[in-house]
Every structure is written in C-alpha cells, then in structure tokens.
Amino acid sequence: MVVDYRGGQEATIYASTQGTFTIPADAAKELGLAQSAVTSSVEHMGGGFGSKFGIGIEGMFACRLSKETKAPVKMMLTRHDEFVMAGNRSGAWQKLKAGVKKDGTIVAIQARQYRLGGIGQGSQAGQPYIYTMGEAYREIYALHTNEDSAIAMRAPGHPQASFAAESLVDELAYKIRMDPVAFRKKNLRDTVYHRQLDRGAQEIGWSRRNPIAGGNHGPLKRGFGCAVGIWGGGGNNQCKVDVNVSRDGAVLVAVGTQDLGTGTRTYTRAIVAEELGLGIKDVQERIGNSKLGGANPSGGSTTAPSLAPSVKDAAVKTRLLLAERVAPLLGNPKPEEITFADKKVTAGGRSITWQEACASLPAAGITGHGEWRSDLQTRGVHGASFAEVEVDVETGHVKPIKMVHVQDGGLPLNRLTFESQINGGMIQSLGQALWEGRVMDAQLGIQLNPGFGDYKLPGTLEMPEMVPIIDDDDKREAVIGIAEGCNIPSLGAVANAVFNACGVRVRDLPITPDKILMGILSNGSMSRTQA
Amino acid sequence: MKSFEWTNPATINEAVKLLATSSSTDIDEAPRPIAGGQDLLTTMKDYTSRPARIVNLKNIRGLNNITLNARGLTIGALVTLTELEEHAGVRKSFPGLAEAAHSIATPQIRNLGTVGGNLCQRPRCWYFRLEDVNCLKKGGSECYAASGENKYNAIIAGGPSYIVHPSDLAPMLLALGARVTAVGPKGRRVIPLDKFFTLPSEGNIRRENVLNNDEIITEIFVPASALATRSTYLKFKERESLDFALASVAAAVQLAPDKTVRAARIVLGGVAPIPWRVPDAENFLTGKALNPEVLTEAAKIALAQAKPLEKNAYKVPLTQTLVRRAVAKAAGV
C-alpha cells in the first residue's frame, strides 16, 4: 500500500484491495481528512481471495506515518508478517455421526462443529452440508486460540464443512457397499447434481475404479473420489457505470470497481463492445478509482453478477442514445430498429460506418449511464468434482493423476476465464488436501512454518491433468459468480480418492505421507472396505 | 537482515585472512564465506546468522573446475549443482552423484548453489530457523523439537539436538568415500568425509562439521571405483517441486559374476544429524544374492538403531522402503 499524503487537504491511497470504495473512509479517519478528499486507486490488485477489505492494520500504520511525516509512505508486509498478522483461513474441528438405511437413504446426522478462528470468530457452514440427511442436530462453537484472527478466504467456512461432509458421505457409502456416485445421487435432491456427477464420472473414468479400497495390486495404487459443491454468487445493486462515446469514435466504459485478476476488465470491455457492434480493442475501460462510479466490494463471488448487468444496462442505453442521434442519417427509423454490428450502423437497408455515426455526435460525445438490473443475474451454482490419485503405499506418497470439475454458472461471460476459475479452484483445493497447513507449536504458541519454504504450496510438478468443464446444460441466461463454488468440492474428492486407493481414511488435513504410512501400519493388513 | 561488510578477496589466503580477523568465535556472529548464497542468505534474513562480514569466494580462480581422471573425480568447491548434475563424466561414472545433485531444490537454486555450500548448509529444523526461538543449536538451553513438532527431525543418533543434516550430496559422497580439502590459517588439510560431519552429542553443538570459522572448503575428491559406477540416490520429498528429504538413501552396489553382492555402501539422509552410514546392512548384503527377502532384511538392519520421536515414526518404514528400492536399483535387479 502507498499512502500519498504530503500535508495538504487531499490524499491518494494505492491499495491492493478487493474494495476500491472500502478505502477512503478508513484512510480519511486516520489522516484527519474528509472522506471525499481521499481517493483510492486500484489499478492492479494482485490477488484477493477474501482477505483484503478496508485498509487493515498495516494501512492504518501507513496512514499514521504519512500524516506524521507529511510524506508518501509505502508499506509492504514481509512474508513472515503476512503469515502471522494478516489473517488466516478459519480452522475447523468437526465430529459427525450419521445413520443410513440399506437402500442408501441417510436418515439422521448429529454434528459437533468447532470454528477455530484464533482470536476471531472463525467460519464454518453448518451440517448437514448440501446433502439431505433427514433428522439433523448440530452444535456449533467458536473456539478461541492465541492465533491471528480468521479472515475470509475462498468460500469462508465451506471447504471445511464440505471436507467433513464428503468424508462422512463416502464412509457411509463404503459401510453399505454402495457406489459413492449412486449414493450421493440418492441423497441429493437437486437433480443438477445428478447430471453433473454423471458427466464427471464419465470424464474421470469412474468405471476404472476398484470398489475395494486399497484393492489394486502392487505398491502403486490408483484410487478415485468425488464430491459436490454449492455457492450463491448473486449480485447486488451498487454498480454505477458510464459509457462515453466520443465524436472520434472512441468508447470509454468507466466504473470504480476492481479487477482481482478474474477478468473484470475483459468482460467490462467485451459487454460494451458487443452491444455497440465493435471489437474488444475498440473499447477502453477505466476502473479501480473511487472517483468513478460506485461499485460493490468483491466478496462472495458477487462482482460479475453485480457489475455485468450494470455494464450491460449502460451499454444498451448508450446504444439507444446513439441510435437516436444517427436516426436522421438512416432515414429516421425507430432507434430500436437500428442495428450495430461489425463496426457499422444499419437500418432499413442503409448503412454507415461507426466513425460516420460518431461524427454526428456533439463535441462532448454522449454518455449512457447504467444501473444494476436484477433480471440479468441470478444466484445459486452447483459443482461436482472428481479426482484420481496414485498412492505409493510403501512411502505414503500421493501423486495426483487427474482432476475433473463440472461447474454451472448461468451465462458464462468469458469461457476462458470461467475455466481458469475452475482450474484455480482445483489447484487451491489440491494444495489444501495434500500440502498446505500452518503448523503451530502448542507450547511456544508460535507458527513454525511462516514462509513458502516450509508452508508447502503445490508446484508445477504436483499438477495433475486438469479438466475444467462448464456445465452448458445450465440454460439460465443470467450472470452468476462462480469463483468460490469452484473452491469447495475438490478437497473432498482428493481425500476420498486417497481412501479408495489405499484404504486409509485421513481425517486431518493435509493428507501427508506420514499420516498415510502410519494409517497403513495401524490398519495392519489393508482394510478391505468395498463400495 | 543485519547490515554487513562485503569483501571480495581474489585468493584463498586473502579469503582466509578476512574470515580469521574477527573477535567472534560464535558461528552465527563470525564472518561467513559466501558462494551461491542459497542457504546463507536465508539464514541471514531469518537472523539465524548475523555476520558482520561476508567474504565472497566467487572471485577466487580455480575453484570451479570438475576434473575426472583414472584416479577419480575432483570437484571444485564453487562448482554449481547444475554443473555437477549435467557433467557427462559424472553421469557416467558417478551416476548417484548426478542424481543427488538433480534432486536438490529447483533449477534456479541449482544454478547458483555450489557443491561446497551444499555440504556446509545449516539445518532446516523449524525451531533453528525461527528468529523467535533460541534453541539449543543457537546457544539456548533446549531442543524444542525433542518434545515439539518433530515430524521432520532425527530418528537416529539424535540428542541433545535432533536436527537432520539437509545435504543431498553428503550421503552420496560419503557412500563413495569422498574426502574434503579445506584451507585455513594453518594451511591445508584433507578430511575424509566420514570424519567431516559431527553429531550434536560429539562436536560443537552449534556446528554440523569440523571446519573452523576461518576455514573454507576448496575441493572434494571422489575416488573412482566400480561401486561408484553402480551408485544411485533415492530422495523422498513431500513435494516434488521443491523440498528437502524426509528421508533419502545413497546406495552403491557391486555384484560378483555370480550375481551375489561383492560390495555395498548404504548411507541414509534426512534421518540423523549427519549422513548416516549403515555398515551392518552393508555387511549383511555382502555375499548374498539379492531377492525381496534379503532386501527387506537389509532394510530392517539399516534402521535397527532408529529411536523415533513422537511424530516421526513414519520415517522408519519410509526409509526401509527407500533402502530396499535404492539397493535394488543400484544393483540393477
């Protein structure tokens, strides 16, 4: 973060934030300025994942330093500080107990759930998670420890609940010797999951799965697992978008929103370009500034469903304004009868170029203003994830072989970035499943691995074949946020694949070789669980 | 990082003088030589080491050659890990050494990291590396790993400190009978590698080897042998992309015409404070034909001295697996 305050009446804050508009008020308070005197600039964000709203403790100190010195202050946390004082994903401890009928119907669940939020509240979705489980009883506690506070991180509380629920569902399937895909379908009312599970099973090659856990020959054993995900991802009414068309044909779309690396800039341009019959290079976007039109903070996968409808609204209004202007050049058709395509403006067989059309505009050009339209967005996504792993039962090594994730999301704004979100979800889940974890020393009360040497993120050699699948059977013509939904199910899918491969149920993440080896030793001869 | 003086000697003698002219005998405060800097810089950033002077060795000529002749292989201390792993003669006559070099860290680190530095790198134990913790190896009174988070720590020959030696070259070089040449104010000395590393219970607990603060490694000699041509290095990492060994095995096996073992060398890495040779297992194998039962028994013997801590018992079966696989691979069975 850079706080550019030089003792005057104004300040500019350059922040890596998920909320351009969450900065000025916080900073103004520290600097002793009016909120309107502080501008926040978020030209490049650098990655969010949930933790970056407001100026934070570090921003507060940067502002105070800048105020004291009347000079710009640049504040950057060390990696160590990032680990120990910038917030953590909430931990979880859960104890689940469930009953199932021989036909595969889950009839009851009892859950005790602890949210491990350090000095914060933590987060954890309630059980039963996604699945219909009949009678349910749950207790949820927040257990405080002397660790940094939990902070939002990719679907807060959901991967945690999902891992426990999917492990339970898998164990129940093995108990009654029912195929885990069939068992899941039996306990999922929403049939979208049924089609996604079938599609994913086909893509991963579920038929190659040995129903006996650990039943394959040799020390290198393949296994398969699956799980499902959910998310809301609906929008809200905060985005104010302006589209300006100049007399020289230039098009500018402006809104104060921020791009977390998700492609916000791309679809903001693309929607306007499409509406005006232009190429994506013919439109410029300006975002990431609190002096531009308002926009919501990017939390809960709400950016696209909040912003895209507002951009569309502005683009449509701009097109109609332009159509009114150029109608006399085309024999006065009704504005809505004028089409904009291929850089031409056409009506009733008469056509002029985009440049000719714009030349008729007043000196300041025209500006269309867009507001949110709830009819262009909706909420509620589903996903099904599958994993194939190979476990070396003599070393405990887990090699991810292939992952498949089927995800719906209403109307995809950009298929490449949609698939990138799915890939990102699979990769982050894989890291959570097999490598990542803060290690705390219980006596000293400190984190032992506050760096990327010892806190192990997966690298390129850990990546399996990844198959992201957009569920095009979802026919909803509406924008929905999908990012966090993509981060939920793969964790359970990988864990369940490990069990299918080697017969060891690791209930404590990450699933590392030591746990697998000790599990195999305590199983004695390999457990012959079948499903 | 504490601020420091950067010095650029052009000769070994100058370098040694710059290392020697210090009042501090504490390894963490004394002047330190730097080559690739891939370990030293991390310890300085962690404040684990706080040298007031850095002595750059990279301007000294003649320390970066690999020489291979009938007697054996001479590796200059400044040879990079990449140069070692890619050297055709090393790959042919000392394949285990090339494998060990390749197993280290990432291509970027291997491009800078040197052979001398690899042998002298400091332990990876979390407690040792954390600025907040004053552990036994840093002059404190307690080895926190003994009763703390000791998943990665020693199962053999630990105590009073339970570090494991992090070098991947060391087990292989030890298996091949290498010796190290070091130069200090009193001149040159040649140290067989089996006398180079020190257990915490034997030597200075603050150090991992017999070098003095003002001594630097200049070269490593590895004798040519039939064993060396049948050598291999198996390293088990939690994360393939970049990791230290949870356990590793350097093995070399020479077979007689009747396919029985004429000679074997087995050295374990990642399980003891020093690279740990297992002569009992080597002797057991000698004269035997290799089959699964023999390999299993040899692996059992190799780990017979293991005394796991609370969270690292898994290293016993893991290392046994690596012993079996490494011996079989080296013997080509």
Image (cartoon, rainbow, N blue to C red):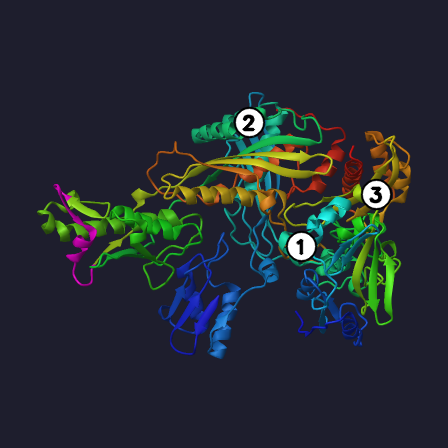
- Which residue is label 1 attached to? B110
Label 3 crowd bin: few (<14), some (14–19), many (20+), radius 10 Å:
many
Residue B301, compared with residue A453, is above or below; it is above
Q: Secondary structure at mark 1?
A: helix
Residue type of the residue flagged with mark 2: Trp
Front in this rendered view, residue B168 or A441: B168
**Of discs 3 and 2, which sits in the foreground?**
3
Indicate which disc residue A206 carries.
2
Protein chain holding label 3:
B
Which is more foreground, mark 2 or mark 1? 1
Above or below for A19 versus B305: below
User: What is the number of the mark on residue B227?
Assistant: 3
Q: Earlier in the sequence, mark 1 or mark 3?
A: 1
User: Residue B304: horizontal and vertical position, in percent?
Assistant: 87, 41
Give me the C-alpha separation between circle 1 and circle 3.
26 Å
Q: Disc 3 to disc 2, how far (Cα)?
A: 47 Å
